[in-house]
Image: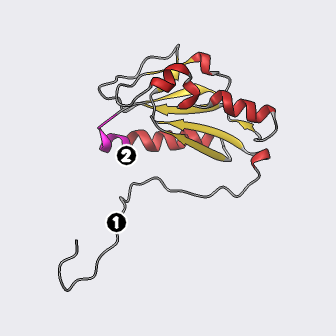
Amino acid sequence: MASEGSAAKPLELSRYCVPFTPFKGKLEEAMVCLVSTAGVREKKDRPFQVEGDDSYRVISGEASGADLAFDDAHYDHGCADHDINCIFPIDRLRELSVEKRIGGLTEKHFSLGFSMALRDLREKTIPQLVREVDRVRPDLVLLTGG
């Protein structure tokens, strides 16, 4: 609450919030990259450390939901236990691609696990991840959380 005599200030967002850029292209031509914070990985990859892990995993664009697992104890994953597409909709996006409703999927997708090491994420992990996403040249990035 503002003190008497001062104007109320709007809530200030963190300068580290996710920038949002509206997509203005044609979905039918767009290559989509999935990026998740739900701890998703290919089953063959090393698991995320559920107590805290500031790394990320690369997921092949050829992977299906059956090839994926997730490591997290910080959200209710009842739905994801039944269908991982709830948190990482790779099969649904592939279906949209077959139907020509999107252009396709990039050759790589990315996932982070749970971490409270916010400084390491901001200074190390996120810049590395952004460079990786940029290299796959997506037209749009679909962000999912756990």
Q: Amino acid at mark 2?
A: Arg
Q: What x and y, as percent, mark residue 91?
A: 67, 27
Return the disc, 1 or 2, that comes first in the chain's sequence: 1
- Circle 2 crowding by C-alpha within 10 Å: few under 14, some 14–19, many from 20: few
Q: What range of the chain is rendered magenta?
A: 115-122
Residue at the spot of label 1? 12
In depth, the one of 96 and 18 nearer the eye is 96
Q: What x and y, as percent, mark residue 10?
A: 34, 71
Q: Residue furthest left?
A: 4
Examine the rendered structure and indicate whether residue 123 appears above or below residue 62: below
Examine the rendered structure and indicate whether residue 47 appears above or below residue 101: above
In depth, the one of 93 and 63 nearer the eye is 93
Quarter of the picture holding the N terminus? bottom left
- The circle drawn on residue 106 is none
Q: Residue at x 68, y 35 (%)?
A: 106
Residue at the spot of label 2? 122
Q: Nearer the viewer, mark 1 or mark 2?
A: 1
Q: What x and y, as percent, mark residue 89?
A: 61, 32
Q: Residue at x 40, y 29 (%)?
A: 76
Q: Is residue 4 magenta?
A: no
User: Quick one: SS at disc 2?
Assistant: helix
Q: Residue at x 34, y 24 (%)?
A: 50
